[in-house]
Every structure is written in structure tokens, then in C-alpha cells.
Image (spheres, rainbow, N blue to C red):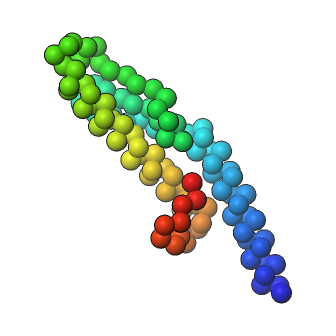
């Protein structure tokens, strides 16, 4: 019976830490860049696009396709960085314990 109580207590602590992590992630912003910094994209912790900067030198009609590709690349860079931040925070919470495959906590 004591083991069940301890498991419930640990589950509650994990849930509290998950809530704290979600709050921290909501306040997190990551920036992805491409084109040597000519394009930058900012994502918030939920993965929503919150900023986009494009160097003025790319603002010509003949550069449109290049700009589009650079925006996509910068977004991919930012998304990768956000996933790294999320993984690091998850490692902190779970104490490095591996989660079952397919289990998504965020």
C-alpha cells in the first residue's frame, strides 16, 4: 500500500513539474536564421511564429523565390532549436529517465 502511495505522490510531483515546464516554454523564444543571417524567424515555446526579419537587400522582385526558401529554412532552424529546448527541459523533469516510444507530454 505504501508503494502505491509513493507512486501517486511521484506522479503528482511529475505533473506539477510538467506544469512549470509548460509555463517556462510558453515564455521561451527561439530564433532560427538562414542566408548567413539575412533571414531570421522567431518562434515562441508553442511553435507559433512571433517574428520575421528579412534583410532589405533581399526585397527585390527577382529575389522572391530565394526569400521564400530562406524563410522556410529559417523556420526549420528555429523549430529544431525549439525541439532541443523542449527535450532539455523534459530531461530535467524526468531525471533522464527514458519515456516510452510515442509518449508525448507536450
In the rendered image, the quadrant that contains the N terminus is bottom right
**Place of residue 97 in the rendered image (x, y in percent of width and height, measured from the top left):** 55, 72
- Tally of marks: 0
Would you identify the image quadrant in which residue 62 lies? Answer: top left
Q: Residue furthest bottom?
A: 1
Q: Is residue 80 above or below residue 62?
A: below
Q: Residue at x 41, y 43 (%)?
A: 79
Question: Closest to the observer: 65 or 17?
Answer: 65
**Place of residue 29 in the rendered image (x, y in percent of width and height, measured from the top left):** 51, 36
**Place of residue 11 in the rendered image (x, y in percent of width and height, measured from the top left):** 72, 69
| 97 displayed left or right of 23 | left
In the rendered image, the quadrant that contains the C terminus is bottom right
Would you identify the image quadrant in which residue 4 lies? Answer: bottom right
Q: Residue at x 54, y 42 (%)?
A: 46
> Is residue 100 in view from this perspective?
yes
Q: Residue furthest left?
A: 62
| 95 displayed left or right of 5 | left
Question: Closest to the observer: 104 or 77?
Answer: 104
> Is residue 57 in view from this perspective?
no
Question: Closest to the observer: 58 or 37?
Answer: 58
Q: Is residue 105 above or below residue 61?
A: below
| 82 displayed left or right of 5 | left
Q: Is residue 87 above or below residue 3?
A: above
Question: Closest to the observer: 67 or 6?
Answer: 67
| 90 displayed left or right of 80 | right
Q: Residue at x 74, y 77 (%)?
A: 7
Q: Is residue 15 above or below residue 26?
A: below
**Place of residue 72 in the rendered image (x, y in percent of width and height, measured from the top left):** 31, 35
Amino acid at each position: 500500500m505504501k508503494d502505491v502511495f509513493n507512486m501517486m505522490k511521484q506522479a503528482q510531483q511529475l505533473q506539477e513539474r510538467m506544469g512549470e515546464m509548460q509555463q517556462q516554454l510558453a515564455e521561451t523564444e527561439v530564433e532560427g536564421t538562414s542566408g548567413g543571417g539575412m533571414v531570421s524567424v522567431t518562434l515562441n515555446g508553442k511553435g507559433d511564429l512571433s517574428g520575421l526579419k528579412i534583410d532589405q537587400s533581399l526585397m527585390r522582385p527577382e529575389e522572391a523565390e530565394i526569400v521564400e526558401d530562406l524563410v522556410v529554412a529559417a523556420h526549420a532552424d528555429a523549430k529544431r532549436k525549439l525541439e532541443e529546448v523542449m527535450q532539455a527541459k523534459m530531461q530535467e523533469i524526468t531525471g533522464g529517465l527514458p519515456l516510452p516510444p510515442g509518449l508525448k507530454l507536450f
